[in-house]
Every structure is written in C-alpha cells, then in structure tokens.
Image (cartoon, helix red, strand yellow):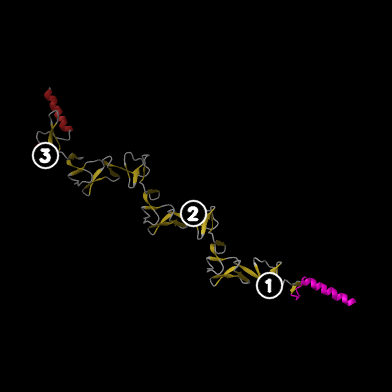
Amino acid sequence: MKIIFKTILMISIIYFSKERICSSDRMCTEADRYKNCVTDASGFGFCSCIEGYVYDSYNNCLKNVSINEECDSSHELCNGDNQECVNKICSCKSGTAYSNEKNKCVTIIGYGETCDDGICDTKLQCGSNSKCICINGYSYNEIEKICQKKVDYGESCDNKYDICGDNLICNNSICSCNSGYTYNEIEKICQKKVDYGESCDNKYDICGDNLICYNSICSCNSGYTYNEIEKICQKKVDYDESCDNKYDICGEKLRCYNSICSCNSGYTYNETEKICQKKVDYCESCDNKYDICGDNLICNNSKCQYSDGSYSHTSSICTYETFTNTDESSYSQFIKFNILFFISLFL
C-alpha cells in the first residue's frame, strides 16, 4: 500500500512540477546546462536553476542580472519587477524608474499625485503630504506640465525648461524685466514704472525719470518742476546757467536762450535780489521787489519817478515839472505862486 502511494505521489509530482526528478546533475544539464540536481528534505531529487540563475516564463534558467548591468535577452533575465533588457542593459520598464530606497523599479508618479508606492518624476520630490512636488528652485508650469527651473534677472533661460522670476520674461534666452518694469539693483527685483501723479509703492514700484515716491505718489525730485506739455520733470535752472529746452526749465521770469537761462524780454537781472525784474517806465506802478524803474527813475510810493521825487499827473498822463527844491514841497510852491499871481491881477 505504501509503495502504491509513493508511486502515485511521484507521478503527481512529475506531472504537476515544472522540474523533472533527478538523481544526478547530468540528468538536469541534458535539458538545461544552467540546472543542477537538488535533493529536498524528503529525499527527492529535482532539477533547479544553478546559483545566479532564475526561471523565465518558459521554465528556462536564465542568468539573474541586476539593474543597469549588461544582459542578453536570450540567455539572461533582469531579476527585478518591472525590468527588461533594453539595448543589452537591464533597465526599468517604460513608466517606471529605479528607487534606491525601495531597491527596485517602481511606478513613476506625476506632480500632485500620491508618492508612497512609487517614485516622483524628474525634478519632483515626495513632499510632507505624500504628494509629488517640484524640487527646491523649481516651479510647476500648468501649461507645460513640468517643473521649470526658477531663473533670476540677467541669467540664461529656456522657455521650455526654465521659468523667469516675478515680473520677468525670457527674451532672447535671457531673463529680462517685463514691459513697463525696470530692474532695481538694490532690491534685486523688477519694479513697475510709475508716472508722475500716480500711486506708488517704494518696494514694488519705481517712479519715472527725475521722480520720487513721496507720500505714495510719484512727484518730481527736489529741484525739478513738472512740465504738463512734455510730461516730464524738468530741472530748475538759475540765471546764466546752461539749459536744455527739453529737460530743463529756467526759473521765474527766465527763458532758455542760446542754451543759457536769461531774463525774459522786458526784464533785467538784479544781482542783489538774484531775480529778473520787470522794467517799468516813468509814472507806472512799481514794486521794489519785482520791478525795476527805468534810467534816472526810482520806485517811490509804488510809482516810478525821477530821483528828486517830483512828478505830476494830468489827464492820466504823467509829465515832469521843474521846480526848485526848498524847505517846502515843489507842489506847495506851485500853489502859492498861482495864488499870488491871481491876487496881483485885482490890485
């Protein structure tokens, strides 16, 4: 009975097993040179792959080759999951990559996907929330679906693989400020150009030429005045200084003539007051600060008159009268003379 059972068991093993029963290595190598005869605990001998070889799907023994080692697809077998022999090198299959941590080829995980059981794609890393995120120094581009390197102002860039910083654009392979922005060497950022009278922020904005951000409004620098026609701040230039009609503005009652600030027509420069004063004729109203009377005239009682202080006004026309200065005023002497003249007519 025992003999019958043992015979049936051996037949079943032979039928269901992939290996043949053997009593010597020779019996195995006749079918496959990479097999030898191995005896199990029960005393049965079975053909098995020699050390360093593994079974393929056809029960052949192929050399067990590790990742990145040379392989021959007909005699060697890449030993890990998701591996295949490509160009005689054991490589991970498409859609997988080798994980040093897991010591095998695992599925490549994309941006934002869970990364516990796989490996994040190129330029990605597994974040604290177990999601694939861009590595440090890279930002995700939703359009290109890749992590792009952050590139600073003035550095080389590639529109496909790089992304310029805030308010920057990749122009002619160099990161430059966007249109309407200017680079600030101190802040190391591109600042928006803001015009005269517009709101500004000293951190993120830069006022235009000869402007300063004052009380959050772009205003002309000290010593400059805004020209509404030219739409620029012009430098205030004093008398007898060099000037440019485009970028400079001469002071009060001055004009830029032959590239020199000179008094306007009808005005004369007063070296003491350092201003241009209007030339005022005899008997016209005057102001000692802003006007200058003509030759031999002085401004007295807000009227230009001769230096002896005499003037008369007849029918809105000023005419000069010659009188002799005595202890009395010239006018009083004139009145007294006329009174005496009329009295003499009646005597």
Determine which quarter of the picture holds residue 56. Answer: top left
Identify the residue shown where x is 85% and y is 76%. 341
Identify the residue shown where x is 16% and y is 32%. 15
Between disc 2 and disc 3, the foreground one is 2
Q: Mark 1: which amino acid? A: Leu
What is the distance, in whole Å, between disc 1 and disc 3 at their CAs? 138 Å
Q: Which residue is mark 3?
A: 29
- Residue with the most extreme top position: 1
| Horizontal side, residue 199 vs residue 67: left or right | right
Q: Which residues are magenta?
A: 320-347
Q: Mark 3: which amino acid? A: Thr
- Residue with the most extreme front position: 327
Q: Position of residue 276 (x, y in %)?
A: 61, 68
Determine which quarter of the picture holds residue 342. Answer: bottom right
Give the secondary structure at mark 3. Answer: helix
Q: Which residue is mark 2?
A: 205
Looking at the picture, tell me which residue is in the foreground, 84 or 139: 139
Give the secondary structure at mark 2. Answer: strand
Q: Is residue 242 above or below residue 118?
A: below
Looking at the picture, tell me which residue is in the foreground, 328 or 269: 328
Q: Which residue is mark 1?
A: 297
> Marks 3 and 2: in contact by CB < 8 Å?
no
Q: Earlier in the sequence, mark 2 or mark 1?
A: 2
Q: Earlier in the sequence, mark 2 or mark 3?
A: 3
Identify the residue shown where x is 88% and y is 77%. 345
